[in-house]
């Protein structure tokens, strides 16, 4: 019986690495998308794939590699992300910094989904790691470029869910919460395991008819 093939982007550290590790423990064949291969520290049952989500050529090369080796993909976790503006507001937001943030946090997941969805079959799952900072129902003013990029990612999630619904592929966004990672910092209230749990619920436990939603800890969030 073939195993589930899962790709996790941004898997060199933090949430991506933890999700990759735990999917391997679940018996998945896990591919860790890593921007800088020299920084990759091997994990049992996890294979590194060079993948820079801000580089379309890198995405296409990774997709060709996965298709050649495995022929299909079952799970895509779009986890790679950056936070470049820890302070400021919309009036002081640097437009070039916003553009760079959107390239990685919003357009990156879209391009990765476009490249890998053709090799996904009915029952496939795409999970976009978003943030409560992207909610329009409860606006956040910290790190405005990051928040805008996650709002855009949520909109992309809805569009992908509608496009892939006829093929039986579920697409959802997830908020892992404020987690103690390099990005979240040591003062964050949630552990790495708790943040990963929120992501893994959509991969491993959510019913497949759930698509086009925004989730945290298995509970639906307002956009």
Image: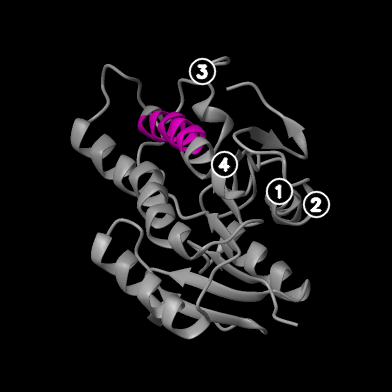
At which x and y percent is residue 91? 27, 16
* Residue drawn 39% across the image and 81% down it: 38
Q: Nearer the viewer, mark 2 or mark 4?
A: 4
- Helix, strand or loop at disc 1? helix
Of the image marks 1 and 4, the number of the one nearer the N terminus: 4
- Residue 47 to residue 137: above or below: below
Q: What residue is pinned by disc 2?
A: 205
Are the residues tagged 1 and 2 within 8 Å (C-beta)? yes
Q: Is residue 25 visible?
A: yes
Residue 136: which numbered mark, if any? 3
Q: What residue is pinned by disc 1?
A: 202
Q: Nearer the viewer, mark 1 or mark 4?
A: 4
CA distance for labels 1 and 4: 16 Å
Q: What residue is pinned by disc 4?
A: 165
Front residue of this view, candidates 135 and 171? 171
Which quarter of the picture shows residue 4?
A: bottom right
What segment carries the magenta color?
A: 145-159
């Amino acid at each position: 019986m073939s195993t589930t093939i899962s790709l996790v982007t941004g898997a060199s550290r933090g949430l991506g690495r933890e999700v990759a590790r735990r999917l391997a423990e679940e018996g998945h064949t896990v591919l860790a998308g890593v921007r800088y291969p020299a920084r990759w520290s091997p994990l049992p049952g996890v294979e590194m794939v060079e993948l820079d989500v801000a580089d379309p050529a890198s995405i296409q090369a990774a997709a060709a590699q996965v298709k050649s080796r495995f022929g299909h993909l079952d799970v895509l976790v779009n986890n790679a992300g950056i936070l470049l503006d820890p302070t400021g507001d919309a009036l002081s937001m640097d437009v070039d910094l916003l553009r760079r943030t959107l390239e990685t946090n919003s357009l990156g997941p879209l391009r990765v989904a476009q490249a890998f969805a053709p090799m996904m079959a009915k029952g496939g799952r795409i999970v976009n790691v978003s943030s409560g900072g992207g909610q329009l129902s409860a606006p956040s003013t910290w790190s405005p470029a990051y928040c805008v990029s996650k709002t855009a990612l949520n909109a992309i999630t809805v569009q992908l869910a509608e496009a892939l619904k006829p093929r039986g592929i579920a697409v959802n966004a997830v908020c892992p919460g404020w987690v103690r990672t390099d990005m979240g910092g040591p003062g964050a209230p949630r552990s790495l395991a708790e943040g990963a749990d929120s992501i893994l619920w959509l991969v491993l436990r959510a019913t497949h008819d759930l698509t086009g939603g925004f989730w945290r800890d298995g509970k639906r969030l307002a956009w």
